[in-house]
Amino acid sequence: METKLVAQPRTKLGTSANRRLRASGMVPGNIYGHKQDPISVSFSAKEAAALVNSTHRVVDLELNGKTETAILRETQWDAYHKQLWHVDFMRVDANERVKADVDVVLRGTSAGALAGGILEQPLHMLHVDCLAINIPEAIFIKVQSLQIGEAIHVKELDIPQGVTVLNNPDAIVVRVIQPIVVEAVSTEAAAPAEPEVIKKEKKVADDADEKAGKK
């Protein structure tokens, strides 16, 4: 599915210019690819962030009254990952094969997690090869039936026709593991044998008193 994003030409470049641009509610970016010169542009920060945080990857970019199809290629955020700082798009032909990253989205709560297990998702994104027009919004996985000790691998995913996954087929996407129980150390075993020391000290004191009495 495609979505639209309006781009504005960006003539003032550099750190200071980009800082002022962000302060005005815009975000700097570039459009490149298809043997055309890169173009420096800016987007509405709100609209660009909404796109980046969505599952859309194919975008209709509107610039100077013309529309180009592109895919999201790179993003940069501030140190706290709250403000989008920069975004790049690559021009594509809707009917050409491209490589893209697609989000993996889990659906439901696993039976194993409900039974006390811990759900882990080692793989949050898949690298795919397909026609630009066929890039999936996301790969959705239903995990309700996943039990403790079970896992779902890349090769077991339901992938749309025409899409090739480039990740290792045996890579684990999601699993439920048994929680690790740490036993408490016995306080009795760890306690020092103080009474014996006290008795020994008392005996030494008694001996000293006895010797003093004999004198």
Image (tube, rainbow, N blue to C red):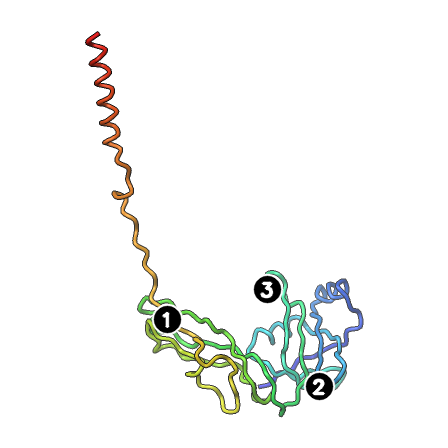
Q: Could you say where residue 87 lies in the image, as x and y percent from the top left?
A: 66, 73
Q: Are marks 2 and 3 in contact (CB under 8 Å)?
A: no
Amino acid beneath label 3 = His
| Residue at mark 1 | 176
| Residue at mark 3 | 81
**Relative to 153, 193 lies left or right:** left
Residue extending furthest toward the top: 215
| Residue at mark 2 | 34
Residue at 60% in and 89% down: 97
**Dot 2 crowding, Cα within 10 Å, few <14, some 14–19, many 20+:** few
Q: CA distance from mark 1 to mark 2?
A: 44 Å
The mark closer to the camera, 2 or 3, is 2
Q: Could you say where residue 148 lies in the image, as x and y percent from the top left?
A: 33, 71
- Tell me the element at label 3: loop
**Relative to 179, 104 lies left or right:** right
Residue at 54% in and 83% down: 128
**Dot 3 crowding, Cα within 10 Å, few <14, some 14–19, many 20+:** few
Q: Quadrant of the N terminus?
A: bottom right
Tag shown at residue 2: none
Q: Could you say where residue 36 lies in the image, as x and y percent from the top left?
A: 75, 84
Q: Nearer the viewer, residue 4 or 77?
A: 77
Amino acid beneath label 2 = His
Q: Could you say where residue 33 lies in the image, as x and y percent from the top left?
A: 70, 83
Task: Give the quarter of the image for residue 130.
Answer: bottom right
- Tell me the element at label 2: loop
Q: Quadrant of the C terminus?
A: top left
Q: CA distance from mark 1 to mark 3?
A: 28 Å
